[in-house]
Image (cartoon, rainbow, N blue to C red):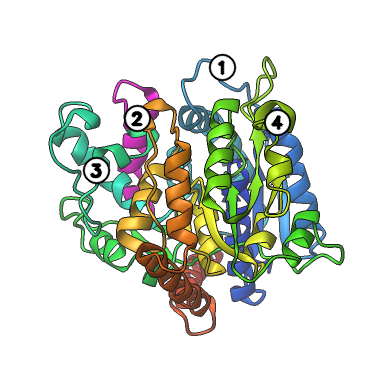
Amino acid sequence: MATPTVVLLPVWGAGHLMSMLDAGKRLLARSDGALSLTVLVMQAPTENNRSEVAGHIRRVEASGLDIRFHHLPAVESPTDFEGIEELISRFVQLHADHVKAAISALTCPVAALVVDLFGTMLLDVSRELAVRAYVYFTANAATYALFLRLPALHEEVTVEFDEMEGMVDVPGLPPVPPSSLPLPVMDKKNPNYTWFVYHGRRFMEADGVIINTATELEQSVLAAIADGRCTRGIPAPTVYPVGPVLSLNPPTEQPHESVRWLDAQPLASVVLLCFGSGGYSTATQAHEIAHGLERSGHRFLWVLRGPPAAGAGTLQPTDANLGELLPEGFLERTKEKGLVWPTKAPQKEILAHAAVGGFVTHSGWNSILESLWFGVPMVPWPLYAEQHLNAFTLVAYTGAAVAMKVDRKMNNFVEASELERAVKALMDGDSDDGRKARETATELKAVCRKAVEKGGSSYSALGRLFEDVRKQAENADK
């Protein structure tokens, strides 16, 4: 009898693709040979995306695990879109027939289909094929709670959210300022908002939602979801908090140059500034960061990326031209205390280093989980997607960060004086805010690691998910 398979349909972004693959690997390990994985690969819209996906696939294939990759036929990518959320949703939608055909053609029993949070339209395919369907939610439970709440909020709040009086009610969270809502929610006339409301409705049709979080990190939010408080009393699908799901590779024999630089720095003395795969600085903003860091007096490792190349048809940052982006003389004046790295850097390896004592982050959920895993307190500097909500919860709910004023109406601009204040608050030994953030980050480091160990909350949730999938596989065999 062929081994039943779980079919994964990830989207191409590294924060989505690798997180779903790593969660799949955990389920595979937990099944102890009772399940295999089949990954349906969409041909991503750009050559850069396709190259990155191919690299990830090669590494997984080299692992020898029972994971098969099936490349779906190419589709014509939409060009008339107004944001990444709309693009991904419409792009996935175009694959519905290909996904149905690929699953139908499999010669082994199909135990489940797992789709990305932007792939809820494919729940129709799972129903047509009588296959159990799950959503893999790469963001946190707070964002999932907002998604579930959004269809009702759409009716309750008749103006734009930034025009409403008072706070936004997301059960399980402190009252949320409208200015902290995700970027796609801030313009109701934008198709990205329409897609957010659409997905918020359709999550309710899934057989379960797998979230990259740990119960202890978002206990009250998960309780509110389970109680139906986010969905007007209607029971939401079962949630499986299986995180933190992180790709943690063993150290390389030849450490990265930035890691070698950290080797020479005192314990917990360096603040890392890194803004994810999509974050970059203009010269104006880079000057403010430089002045703020220099005046703070603290050691720093700054991963600085430049704006996307003009006319390149991509939003990917470029390697920074330090001569164009930095103030004259800055590198010379700070050479004893700082390192500016002008291209991609190994963020996880840097956060793992004992010399790093703080992290100025774009507040992407994967980066937050990495920082918590290594017990590093943060200063959130949100840029796009759901990062403004993450930044709010990180300070007001989780407590592992020091707040910083980010001017959202000025393209998330931060002045030098505000960065200086936040870095000092985070790193100075006599700062109450910094002390609280450091203590909380240290506590949550232990919480995150215990959650995924045998007997931990995420380990147990993964076990419940496996049992659910196994029963479906047994039914498929009959």
Q: Amino acid at mark 1?
A: Thr
Q: Which residues are magenta?
A: 186-207
Q: Which sits in the foreground, 151 or 252?
A: 252
Query: Mark 3 or 4 closer to N-term?
Result: 3
Q: Quadrant of residue 48?
A: top right
Query: Residue 255, image x and y in percent?
Result: 81, 62
Which residue is disc 4 drawn over? 318
Identify the residue shown where x is 57% and y is 69%: 374
Magenta-drawn stretch contains 119? no
Kindly identify the amino acid type of the residue bearing the numbered disc 4: Thr
Residue 137's tag is: none
Q: Mark 1 and mark 2: span between their CA atoms?
A: 18 Å
Dot 2 amino acid type: Tyr
204 in the magenta segment: yes
Residue 164 location, quadrant? top left
Q: In 3D space, how far apart are the residues under numbered discs 1 and 3 (Cα atoms)? A: 34 Å
Which residue is tagged 3? 177
Q: Which residue is mark 1?
A: 79
Q: Choose mark 4 or mark 1, whichever is in front.
A: 4
Task: Classify mark 4: helix, strand or loop.
Answer: strand
Q: CA distance from mark 4 to mark 2?
A: 29 Å
Q: Does the residue at mark 4 contact the one at mark 1 (Cβ under 8 Å)?
A: no
Q: Judge the density around disc 1: few (<14), some (14-19), many (≥20) Cα neighbours within 10 Å.
A: few
Residue 42 shows in the view:
yes
Q: Nearer the viewer, residue 343 or 272?
A: 272
Of mark 4 and mark 1, the one earlier in the sequence is: 1
